[in-house]
Image (cartoon, rainbow, N blue to C red):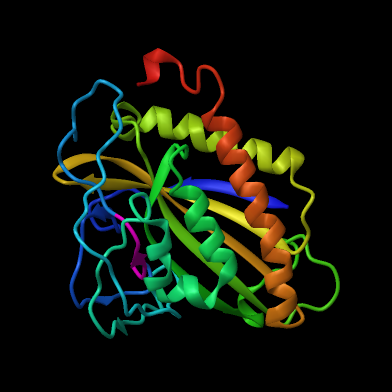
Amino acid sequence: MEADWAVAIGPDLPRIEVPWSGNETWSSNETRSSDETWSADETGSGDGTDFAISHEGDREGVAAGARESDGSDVQSVDVPGILRFVDLRADPASIDQIEEARRHPGLKRALLALNSQDSPVFTSKCDVIQITKEEIDPLEYDADGETRCGLAYYIDLVVRKSTIFCSFSAHEMWLREVVKQLRESAQVRSARVDFVLRAATVFDCDGFAATCYIAACGDDFASAQRAWEPALDAVLRSLASVSSAAPPFPDASL
């Protein structure tokens, strides 16, 4: 399976922001849907503690279908309904309020795993994208046979430890190791994983977070979905393995 990571940080580039709510219109490189947020109780403490999870409600009504680009073909997507976040840590059963999770069991499984009590991260936004044949390079997906379409799921990941959240170098080391493990151990065809390191603001605390893109292709959407599932499993294993390493990051990087 192909895997890579990149940095997209700059004054004109999208940020990962928590919290957010309300009816919004997003460009193609900002389309995401919320499932959880932080409170400000421990933000910026710098002592390595977890950020607290806020119990502020839930969200429903999200748009899907826009995709990231270089800006030359940006499209706006009107988001119907009211966007409200779901606190999956406090109430995992509330995931059924997330439209994408109801429609895509694989995404539901991913969100529950990433927001579990022992997860080193939580998720802030997600979306599902259909990929056309013209957008797929079979070599980049390590694909065999004819490829007609694909699916991409992306999830914004926020590290719970405040000291790591504030450290660019810690995120860089984290993503390098996750990508290395995926390249070396994930025996998955017709799929690829990309991480994008972004600037983030969580209740007025500036730091960093990552968008994880898991994409797969096939001769139809059903086969693309079948290729996506093992790619997701590989990502979850790598995230858990790297985050549970001892120590996960040198003290100097935090």
Q: Is residue 176 rendered to the left or right of residue 206?
A: right
Residue located at (30% from left, 23% from top):
48
Magenta-drawn stretch contains 31: yes
Q: Nearer the viewer, residue 138 or 177?
A: 177
Within the image, what quadrant is residue 176 found in? top right
Q: Nearer the viewer, residue 226 or 13?
A: 226
Can you say which quadrant of the picture contains the C terminus?
top left
Locate residue 246 relative to residue 57 in the image: left or right.
Answer: right
Which is the main secondary structure of the residues drawn in magenta? loop
Determine the residue positioned at 63% across, 55% down.
232
Q: Residue at x 34, y 31 (%)?
A: 161
Asked which quadrant contains residue 35, the reply is bottom left
Image position, residue 170 (x, y; %) = 41, 28
Q: Is residue 132 above or below residue 30?
A: below
Q: Is residue 15 left or right of residue 171?
A: left
Number of numbered discs overlaid on the protein picture: 0
Q: Nearer the viewer, residue 180 or 239?
A: 239
Left/right placement of residue 176 relative to residue 10 reads right
Image: magenta residue range:
30-36
Measuring from the top left, give residue 192's x and y in whole percent: 65, 57
Instruction: Give the image quarter of residue 73.
Output: bottom left
Return the x and y of residue 14 as percentages of the image width and height: 30, 59
Q: Residue at x 62, y 39 (%)?
A: 238
- Image coordinates for residue 224, horizontal then vertical, percent: 70, 73
Of 154 and 50, the residue lying toward us: 50
Inspect the magenta stretch and tell me whether residue 10 lies in it: no
